[in-house]
Amino acid sequence: MENEMFMERAHRFLADGTVPDPVRDAPPELTEKVDTVLGIVAWVGTAAGVAGVLITGAMMSMSLRRGEGSEHLGRLGMVLAGCVLVTSAGPLVSFVV
């Protein structure tokens, strides 16, 4: 009985054709501060990715000299995956929201 009532209300709501569109109403002062913090975090993430690639490359070159070349390829893959994640975080969230 309850399920039928719920389905009837849902049907009436959806058949209406109106989709709720919430208004984003954040204060401009807060938006500016959040944008600043997110910009700093994005910059730090990018710098960490560049540093990770440089450090991994240096370690690989030292290992090649000693004859242990392929040990650091997994680490390089993890660093590059982190770089992709940091780079695509903004567009992914924008797509979902």
Image: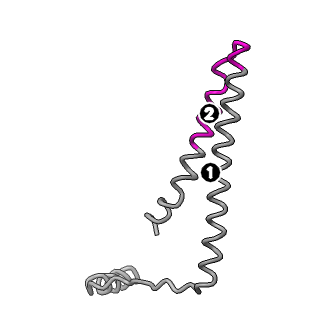
Q: Position of residue 35 (x, y in %)?
A: 60, 71
- Residue 46, numbered circle: 1
Residue 65 inside the magenta-drawn segment: yes
The residue sitting at 64% across, 37% down in the picture is 53
- Of the pair 72 and 53, the residue shown nearer to us: 53
Classify 10 Å Cα crowding around label 1: few (below 14), some (14-19), many (20 and above): some
Q: Position of residue 46 (x, y in %)?
A: 62, 51
Q: What secondary structure do most residues of the magenta stretch adopt?
A: helix
Disc 1 element: helix
Disc 2 residue type (three-letter): Leu
Which color scheme is applied?
Answer: one colour
Whether 22 is drawn above or below 89: the answer is below
Residue 61 left/right relative to 1: right
In the rendered image, which residue does mark 2 sit on?
76
Q: Position of residue 8 (x, y in %)?
A: 31, 84
Q: Nearer the viewer, mark 1 or mark 2?
A: 1
Pointers 1 and 2 in contact (C-beta within 8 Å): no
- Quadrant location of the N terminus in the rendered image: bottom left
Can residue 1 be seen from the camera position used here? no
- Of the pair 82 and 57, the residue shown nearer to us: 57
The residue sitting at 58% across, 46% down in the picture is 83
Give the CA separation, mark 1 to mark 2: 15 Å
Residue 15 left/right relative to 97: left
Residue 9 inside the magenta-drawn segment: no
Disc 2 element: helix
Can residue 75 be seen from the camera position used here? yes
Classify 10 Å Cα crowding around label 2: few (below 14), some (14-19), many (20 and above): some
Whether 82 is drawn above or below 55: the answer is below
Disc nearer the start of the sequence (1/2): 1
Segment colored magenta: 63-81
